[in-house]
Image (cartoon, helix red, strand yellow):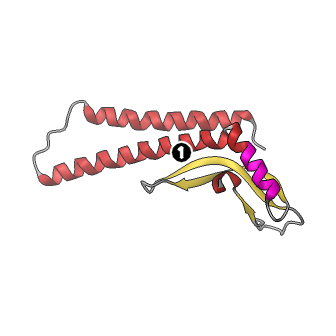
Amino acid sequence: MTSDSGVNSQDTDDARHIQEVLDELRQMQQPPQLVTSPDALEALEREIRQRTDRLGSLLVGQHLQQALDSDTLQAEQEQLVRQWPKPLKNDGKVTVMVRTVQGLAVPVRLTYYRRQGQRRAGKRDAGVYAGLVL
């Protein structure tokens, strides 16, 4: 299981990454760039789009993490695991990269449940990320 400090660290990292992208966007705003050709306009638009897509992905990741950590979703996960056709064991929290609609991957921490029983050496047993199923 993950301690509260691990979750707090994730929240701090998310906020720091979001602030970094916001700072980059502010720097692009002051002073405005002089665009004198179609190629320069296209390059500026591409740079702005990349940063706003990154910001959007980070915000989506932050909202997803908050939802995964909510008491409501935790209770629903436990209910799903209890109703699973085969018994599952809580294997602790792991970091998983989730790809957003913008195409960028953001890290989220969630609980991995695996089938109970003997583990194969070096192999990950079949299991489920109940938070992502819901």
The boundaries of the magenta stretch are 75-83
The residue under the point 59% across, 35% down is: 11
Residue 124: percent from left, percent from top: 75, 65
- Compared with 116, 4 (above or below) is above
The dominant secondary structure in magenta is helix
Q: Is residue 116 left or right of residue 76?
A: right
Identify the residue position indicated by label 1 in the image. Answer: 61
Residue 56 position by quadrant: top left
Q: Is residue 130 left or right of residue 99?
A: right
Task: Looking at this view, name the residue that lies furthest to the left.
Answer: 36
Amino acid beneath label 1: Gly
Sort mark 1 into few (<14), some (14-19) or many (20+) by Cα contacts within 10 Å: many
The residue under the point 83% across, 56% down is: 89
Q: Looking at the figure, which quarter contains the N terminus?
A: top right
Residue 114 position by quadrant: bottom right
What secondary structure is found at the residue carrying circle 1? helix
Residue 25: within the magenta? no
Q: Nearest the camera: 74 or 34?
A: 74
**Residue 92 visible in this rendered orientation of the protein:** no
Residue 74: percent from left, percent from top: 72, 43
Residue 10: percent from left, percent from top: 61, 38
Q: Is residue 127 left or right of residue 24?
A: right
**Residue 37 visible in this rendered orientation of the protein:** yes
Task: Looking at this view, name the residue that lies furthest to the top.
Answer: 30
Residue 82: within the magenta? yes
Q: Nearest the camera: 128 or 81?
A: 81
Q: Nearest the camera: 126 or 82?
A: 82
Residue 69: percent from left, percent from top: 67, 40
The residue under the point 51% across, 34% down is: 16
- Compared with 79, 67 (above or below) is above
